[in-house]
Image (cartoon, rainbow, N blue to C red):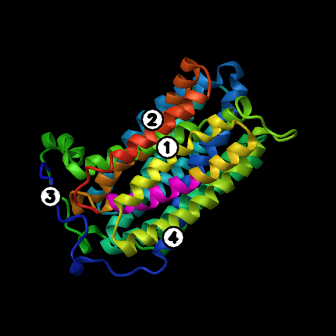
Amino acid sequence: MATNEITHPAAPPAAAQPPRQRGLLPLLLVANSAMLAVYMGVGSVLLPTQIAAIAPDDKVALLGLIGGISAIFATAFNPIAGALSDRTGRRNPWILGGAFASLAGLAFLGNVATALLVGIGWCLIQATMNVYQAAVTAIVPDRIPADRRGTASALVGLGLPIGGTVGVLVASQTVDHLRTGYLVLGAIVSVSALLLTLFCRDLPRTEHAPAAAPRPKGAQMAAFLSSLAHHDFRWAFIGRALMVLGYFSVVGYQLYILDDHIALPAGLTPPAAIAVLTPVSMVAMAVSTVVGGLLSDRWNRRKVFVGVSAALAGLVMAVPVISPTWTGMLVFSALNGLAFGCFMAVDTALVTLVLPRAEDAARDMGVLNIANAGPQIIAPFVASAIVTGLGGYTPLFLAGGALSLIGALAILPIRSVR
């Protein structure tokens, strides 16, 4: 769509709203928490630990290489799965299929001992988890009224602090038994998928949104990323991508930062330090997620919350540069959690309000999720290039802060949401 003026077609008219499903939001919270448990537990602890054990002298570059290659799978499978979910008119089969395939991939990853097989396993997990994520993410624009999406996104957004904490704690406790850690995280996402699909029936798309019109095969590829031609959606995509890239460039390397850059107290190991820092960050994130989502609904304002929180996330990256100490990391984790939690909660609500077409909601949310999944996996590649090329972790913090600040500016051109 080339027009810059929209009237939020992603929100179906009242008559087309689906019947209420009890427990939908709590089940979505569980599903999102499980997803983030896998991403954070594997990405922050298990995968870096496994790579460091295989190639301790090349761990930074190898983690970046595996992350960069797996980014292709993450960024491709999310919108593809979203488009297929739209086409079939169902979400539950994709949720179940993605979860159980991820369990198989995690089991495989826990039983390999070479860099090549670790890379293959992580690529498979990124592909299957993004199938799961595409279908779960589409449920909010499918079934939640537009005027309640800030609250809904805040509740669902608690998946990051809850899932992140659970994932990192599980990973930290099983860091000496990687196979067990991978299997536990796979079981968590599989059980969450079963709960969501058993207790929340899958509504055919025809019951609550118009079916996607068939397109000639020659036009399908152009239609696939057509949402990025929409002015507001494009800027929301850019802002999300920059913010997530800045955040995960640092968080994804946290184990190595604690090992090589921060002066930890005597007797505190990097995995144990992560097990402390993560709850600090996630509690702060939970508070700002709820408060930001509720206030954005009450005041009917999205952009100010998104922009200010992104700017704060950029500024706090200076804390570990000024104070590369355990205290500095505690302060950084708390402030960064506050900023990122508010951003993700309100930005998710904002994005659902700038979707170009209701009938393509899952596909377009899948395209948007490229800005979620892609940077999270590309971040290690970018971070390794910065650390090895510029000589340390101080440039990494500064680069992460700059990305977040630019992401804050990218929110300003959005016109249709206040």
- Labels 3 and 2: the sequence-earlier one: 3
Q: CA distance from mark 3 to mark 2?
A: 33 Å
Q: CA distance from mark 4 to mark 1?
A: 32 Å
Q: Indicate left or right for 264 with 74 as reference.
A: right
In the rendering, which numbered label is found on residue 314? Answer: 1
Dividing the picture into quadrants, the one containing residue 418 is bottom left
Q: Are marks 4 and 1 in contact (CB under 8 Å)?
A: no
Residue at point 47%, 72% (across, down) = 25
Q: Amino acid at mark 3?
A: Glu
Q: SS class of the residue under badge 1?
A: helix
Q: Indicate left or right for 142 with 45 as reference.
A: left
Q: Main secondary structure of the magenta part?
A: helix
Which is nearer the eye, 173 or 135?
173
Which residues, given as a range, are shown in magenta? Answer: 337-351
Which is nearer the eye, 146 or 133?
146
Query: Could you classify mark 4 by the number of other residues whose Cα lies within 10 Å: few (under 14), some (14-19), or many (20 or more)?
Result: some
Q: Indicate left or right for 310 with 178 as reference.
A: left
Q: Which residue is mark 3?
A: 5
Q: CA distance from mark 3 to mark 1?
A: 30 Å
- Residue 78: % across, % down: 38, 47
Q: Which residue is mark 4?
A: 27
- Labels 2 and 1: the sequence-earlier one: 2
As for residue 348 lying within the magenta part, the answer is: yes
Instruction: Indicate which label's residue lies in the foreground, 4 or 1.
Output: 1
As for residue 389 lying within the magenta part, the answer is: no
- Labels 3 and 4: the sequence-earlier one: 3
